[in-house]
Amino acid sequence: MSTADGDPWWRGAVIYQVYPRSFADGGGDGVGDIAGIRAHLDHLSALGVDAIWLSPWYPSPMADAGYDVSDYRDIDPIFGTLAEAEALIEEAHAANIRIIVDVVPNHCSDAHPWFQAALAGGPDAPERDLFWFRPGRGPNGDEPPNNWRSEFGGGTWTRTTNPDGTPGDWYLHLFSPEQPDLNWDHPKVRAEFESILRFWLDRGVDGVRIDSAALLLKHPALPDHHDDRPSPYVDLDEVHDVYRSWRRITDGYPGDRILIGEVWLPDTRRFADYLRPDELHTAFNFEFLGCAWDPDLLRACVDATLEAHALVGAPATWVLSNHDVTRHVTRYGRADTTFSFAKKRQGVVTDLELGTRRARAGALLTLSLPGATYVYQGEELGLWEVEDIPEALRQDPMWARSGHGRDGCRVPLPWSGDAAPFGFSPAGATSPPWLPQPADWKDRTVQAQTGDPHSMLELYRDAIRIRRTEPSLGDGTLRWLPAPDGVLAFARDPGFACVVNLSTGSVVLPEHRSCLLASGPLDGELLPPDTAVWLRID
């Protein structure tokens, strides 16, 4: 459905990311599941979100928490059944919440039937053409075919063993060895994923989020990578052809279905190239996610984002955290408030009180910028990164390969009670939560924060409620207002302003008729440091 003014719903939506294994455990085995999501739809309805984006829930050996898919048309038993997924879609729609599923097209699991056939059939197996099998370099083929580095650290090639026991060819995996890359030059691969897209659209999903959307098409020569030239992974023209075909499929379904891309590119204009009118509808704004808590850098990022998206008529997106990055309550409490995978900083001194104050202000900033906003589960509770997980309990393959793990932002949510599992699992659960929860989260449960006007949860509920009813918010434009050094101030017409104080001292609020919402206490007409306010202006 479109919005009341006729624009597609996704142009100004608030989309909530559910990481299924960590949202809520309905079965009592310590792992989140579809039953848990269905049981807590009331939380998402009360929060006021427009849609849920679900991280992969497909059958998988779980070498990478489900991003190694063995069957794209079913549900892993650890999460439930396909019938339960269809029931969730129906129940969410009844609550006016849309459903977006994650599709992982760059690679599959090494347990996928195609890859198993490629191994079993030896060097002449036709299934090998669906992947990137290549002979090794060196006299005996003992060296990898090129020098590419994995997104998880280490090499990108693993050598096979032929059916007769002799060393065989190597296969490419930009992530872990359990995730062989698919060959998108092969028509069977393209046809398969078009079929998968239709499968889920036929079941009523409202959109698809495309994992690693820029990596699909490799340079056919697979050249060595050198630091002084762009990555050789991607054939950009061919990638655009893929998403044009997907867009034609999506546009053939009623109800403004959406394609969302995960596009990690350093240049904002290249990023926006994926959002031309016949390709992806939106893509994640990682530049904003990784931006420092700095007024000049944030303003430059907002300007560059809006300018690039305006060129192609696409809405911007704003996101502070997700299942791959250090939670922003922690990042914002450090001297270096940026994020990159190369700069995971576990053990660095963190001021969680400062980080929480900035996170509250950041919530009002993102929810008032033009376009769509993504909320990662738990950020509405003010959760911080859990950095003291025992090594024996860590499950992220990135940790083993690079020492930079993502488990700390994936710890199961706290719902109620004063001790773990904090209502994540039902009474009588047979196993503890799959990752340990901090005891200090007893003050961060949904139960503890509900009704507390000073809590992070009620701030998010109020902000999203106002956003829904405020005609100036959602998609559109902004205009910057005069402001003191260290302050971001902008107007959204008609009659709305957001002011964020990133300086070290209090500043006088601009002229206004009333205060709609503040991220923290105001000092009369003064806005304290690291505080944001929404104002009604003339």
Image (tube, rainbow, N blue to C red):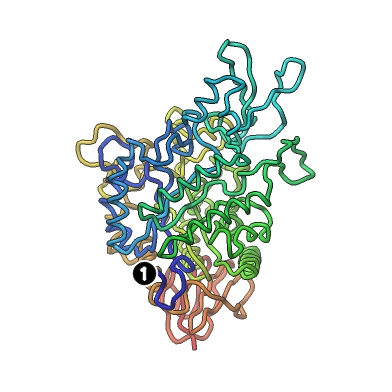
Q: Residue furthest bottom?
A: 538
**Residue 204 visible in image:** yes
Q: Residue furthest left?
A: 428
Residue 173 against residue 510 in the figure, above or below:
above
**Closest to the observer, 163 or 167:** 163
**Residue 357 visible in image:** no
Left or right: residue 27 compared with residue 380? left
* Image x and y of residue 424, in percent: 29, 44
Q: Amino acid at mark 1?
A: Asp
Residue 426 against residue 357 in the figure, above or below:
above
> Which residue does the numbered mark 1 point to in the structure image?
462
**Closest to the observer, 289 or 240:** 240
Quadrant position of residue 184: top right
* Image x and y of residue 380, in percent: 39, 58
Q: Residue furthest right?
A: 228
Query: Residue shown at 25%/51% (left/top)?
Result: 39
* Image x and y of residue 311, in percent: 65, 69
